[in-house]
Amino acid sequence: MSIHVVKPDGGEQSGGGPIRCRIIEDGSHTEHRLGLIESTVPAGPAAPPQHVHREHDETFIVTQGKLRFTSGDNSVDVEVGSCVVVPAGTPHTFSNPFSQPAKFICTLTPDRYVEYFRDLSKLPVNEQGLLDFADVGKTMAKYATDVIR
């Protein structure tokens, strides 16, 4: 086994709607213990529905701009350098109601949810360029994730 390097312009482009994703590590180099993505979230209404992962944890590190993370009825605005840890079973979502685009790096442990981002790229968008929440929810369900209604 040797190290694996993904350069800044490398990785696999994915995601759906206006939120774009770069898959940096799909788990193939970590025996599927870890997936790693970078997402770009434009300012505006694009956001996943609030949801709960049953089989993986996520850790977000904001690298550009500012994001709002919501868990249940509680929201917190986080800036560059902030780290948000979301253990399995914790309801959450994120949004960018601010004026500038934002980026984050996200770990997925284990890596199974990487496939969700690949699936998002196959979903249709509406006239505003947004994904339908019902389509997103069905896709999430394939990866042991429930939308909070």
Image (cartoon, rainbow, N blue to C red):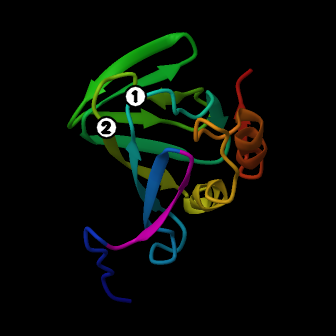
Left or right: 75, with 120 as reference point? left
Residue that numbered label 2 is attached to:
101
For the residue marked with disc 1, what is the amino acid?
Asn
Q: Residue at x 46, y 65 (%)?
A: 13
Q: Quadrant of the C terminus?
A: top right
Q: Position of residue 68 (x, y in %)?
A: 39, 23
Q: Residue furthest left?
A: 81
Q: Quadrant of the N terminus?
A: bottom left
Left or right: 47, with 138 as reference point? left
Q: Residue at x 40, y 71 (%)?
A: 11
Highlighted magenta segment, given as a residue range: 10-17
Q: Is residue 90 visible?
A: yes
Q: Residue furthest front?
A: 127
For the residue marked with disc 2, what is the amino acid?
Pro
Q: Residue furthest top?
A: 73
| In the foreground, 122 or 112 | 122
Q: Position of residue 112 (x, y in %)?
A: 62, 60
Rendering quarter of residue 135? top right
Q: Residue at x 63, y 53 (%)?
A: 120
Q: Position of residue 5 (x, y in %)?
A: 29, 78
Main SS of the magenta part reads: strand
Residue 89, compared with residue 98, is above or below; it is below
Mark 2 nearby-residue class (10 Å; few <14, some 14–19, many ≥20): some
Left or right: 17, with 1 as reference point? right
Residue that numbered label 1 is attached to:
96
Q: Position of residue 85 (x, y in %)?
A: 41, 35
Tell me whether circle 1 and circle 2 mark residues in contact (CB < 8 Å): yes
Q: Residue furthest bottom?
A: 1
Residue 127, compared with residue 124, is above or below; it is above
Q: Is residue 36 visible?
A: no
Mark 1 nearby-residue class (10 Å; few <14, some 14–19, many ≥20): many
